[in-house]
Image (cartoon, helix red, strand yellow):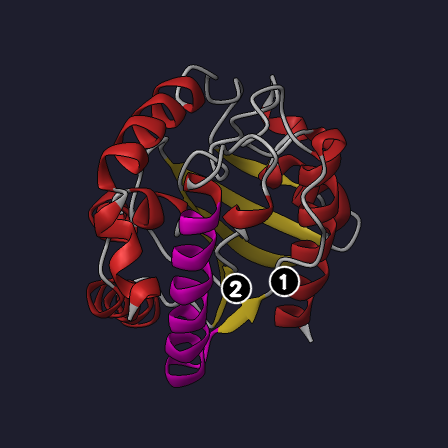
């Protein structure tokens, strides 16, 4: 019971730390470079990256070093990739669904969402509904045969967050990631766990967004999973 009440008891502390965190994190710009294009030769693969600041490449200077660029580095030798990035800093899952409207058809959709749902205190039930609706849209409206949902990062392990905010966000992130796994299982999507311990050397200078090494690892992993859509 105490654990459930603690966030409310410490609300002023959380609020002050959270405001400072968000203000600092949003100062880094989205990566420069195109948000759509064609790369490589071979079998056709229509790829979408849909997400928040991490999908937009915040933390590196150019899209070549961001998630999409690193995916293309591994995909282009094997496929003709028609790709698009639809991502915006601060986007929640609900916002991403609106951002998707008017987009075309895709074979593979990579989702990079959840952090802002944690920061904005999205309830677990609402998060589940938004994720399920988004995946349904991707399947039914945009033809995505393969959906790769990146895990909600373990915010409790990120060195930039002060205590007690770090512990609280960590619990919230763990909860929403558990919900995301359940939604993926129901929707036939693939939940892709966060398989690295957040380390300052993997992150951008704000200690929050991915840096080039983390994007490289993430992109290689997602590319390997995306290639299965061709088999």
28 relative to 217, above or below: above
Which residue: 29% across, 27% down?
A: 16
Q: Which residue is mark 1?
A: 226
Q: Position of residue 153 (x, y in %)?
A: 53, 51
Which residue lies most toward the right here?
A: 77
- Residues at circles 1 and 2 in contact by the CB criterion of under 8 Å: yes
Horizontally, is 39 left or right of 151 in the view?
right
Residue located at (50% from left, 34% from top): 161
Residue 225, image quadrant: bottom right
Closer-to-camera residue (77/66): 66
Screen quadrant of the N terminus: bottom left
Position of residue 136 measured from the top left corner of the image (x, y, whole percent): 28, 71
The x, y position of residue 150, in whole percent, is: 53, 58
Q: Is residue 121 visible?
A: no
Residue 148's disc is 2
- Tell whether 159 sits left or right of 141: right
Q: On screen, 172 above or below 26? A: below
Magenta segment range?
167-189
**Dot 1 lies on which element?**
helix
Where residue 213 appears, x then y in whole percent?
A: 75, 35
| Labels in figure, total | 2
Quarter placement of the C terminus: bottom right
- The image's mark for residue 93 is none
221 up-or-down from 4: above or below: above
Please give the name of the residue rendered at 76% of the width and 48% of the height, measured from the top-left corner. 74
Q: Nearer the viewer, residue 131 or 227?
A: 131
In the rendered structure, which disc, 1 or 2, sits on the residue that comes first in sequence? 2
């Amino acid at each position: 019971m105490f654990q459930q009440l603690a966030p409310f008891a410490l609300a002023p502390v959380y609020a002050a730390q959270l405001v400072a965190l968000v203000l600092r994190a949003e100062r880094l710009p989205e990566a420069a470079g195109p948000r759509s294009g064609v790369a490589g030769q071979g079998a056709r693969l229509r790829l979408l990256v849909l997400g928040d600041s991490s999908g937009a490449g915040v933390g590196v200077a150019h899209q070549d070093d961001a998630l999409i660029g690193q995916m293309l580095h591994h995909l282009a030798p094997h496929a003709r990739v028609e790709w698009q990035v639809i991502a915006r800093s601060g986007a929640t899952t609900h916002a991403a669904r609106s951002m998707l409207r008017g987009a075309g058809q895709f074979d593979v959709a990579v989702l990079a969402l959840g952090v802002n749902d944690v920061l904005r205190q999205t309830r677990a039930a609402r998060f589940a509904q938004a994720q399920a609706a988004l995946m349904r849209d991707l399947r039914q409206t945009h033809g995505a045969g393969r959906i790769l949902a990146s895990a909600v990062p373990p915010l409790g392990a990120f060195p930039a967050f002060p205590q007690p905010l770090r512990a609280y966000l960590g619990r919230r992130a763990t909860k929403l990631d558990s919900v995301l796994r359940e939604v993926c299982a129901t929707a036939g999507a693939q939940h892709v766990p966060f398989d690295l311990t957040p380390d300052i050397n993997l992150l951008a200078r704000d200690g929050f967004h991915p840096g080039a090494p983390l994007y490289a690892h993430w992109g290689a992993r997602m590319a390997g999973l995306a290639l299965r859509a061709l088999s």
